[in-house]
Amino acid sequence: MGIFNFFKAKNITKDWERDKNLTLNFDFTLNSLNNIKIGNNFQLLSNLGPCDNKKKLKVNDFLYLSLGLLVGTDNNQKIDTFILYWNDIFEKEFTAYAGKCFFQDKQILLSEKTTKEEFIKIFGEPYWQDIDFTGDTLYDEIILFYEFSNLEWQVEFLRDETLKLIIITNKPIMDDKECRNAYGVTKDWPPKFY
């Protein structure tokens, strides 16, 4: 093994087969995809089939473009991030998330047309909101940060306030004081967790 191969992530999905009857259900109460939670072993999602990564993995991010899904793992193949895409305006590779969403035991409708106001009506007020309008509509965005005791949601909206993507991660950037300063956070840390 060469020194540079040591730093490449292994694509453990290459021999996986997608379940022909695959359905996706993301539960925002449990922060789980098909009952598989952050911290669980990624192999429990082998029914997703092989990932769509075109290049050799540099990090442990497994792309499922046709499902509108990214699953991130740590070096031990424990899931640390889910990203659900609705508007992939940068790469234009991900289709809209192909599954259902649930919150507090009810199915909720999230789509590329879901507005920031509708999202807040469902999930409540975020810990922090960042509005970054540079004048370039491609990069303009609004991010809502929801903080929990063991994870963070980063909910991104386009300039027109329609849903772009949701990041669910156990690596909260708001846990870092420098990041909070960069986002201009004026609220106490840690927040009162949901």
Image (cartoon, rainbow, N blue to C red):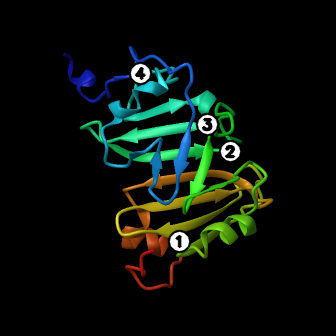
Q: Sequence-wise, which precedes: disc 4 or disc 1?
A: 4
Left of 164 or right of it: where is 31? left
- Residue 109, image x, y percentages: 70, 53
Report how far apart the C-alphas of labels 2 and 1 lie in the structure. 24 Å
Q: Quadrant of the C terminus?
A: bottom left
Residue 86's disc is: 2
Q: Is residue 4 above or below residue 90?
A: above
Instruction: Name the residue at 37% across, 56% down.
Output: 170
Report the residue marked by disc 1: 183
Report how far apart the C-alphas of labels 3 and 2 lie in the structure. 7 Å
Q: Characterize the local packing of mark 3: few (<14), some (14-19) or many (20 or more) Cα atoms within 10 angstroms.
A: many
- Residue 153, image x, y percentages: 50, 60
Is disc 4 in contact with disc 1, using a CB cutoff of under 8 Å?
A: no
Q: Sequence-wise, which precedes: disc 4 or disc 3?
A: 4
The kind of secondary structure element at disc 2 is loop
Is disc 3 in contact with disc 2, using a CB cutoff of under 8 Å?
A: yes
Instruction: Name the residue at 66% across, 67% down.
Output: 122
Report the residue marked by disc 4: 56
- Residue 127, image x, y percentages: 52, 76
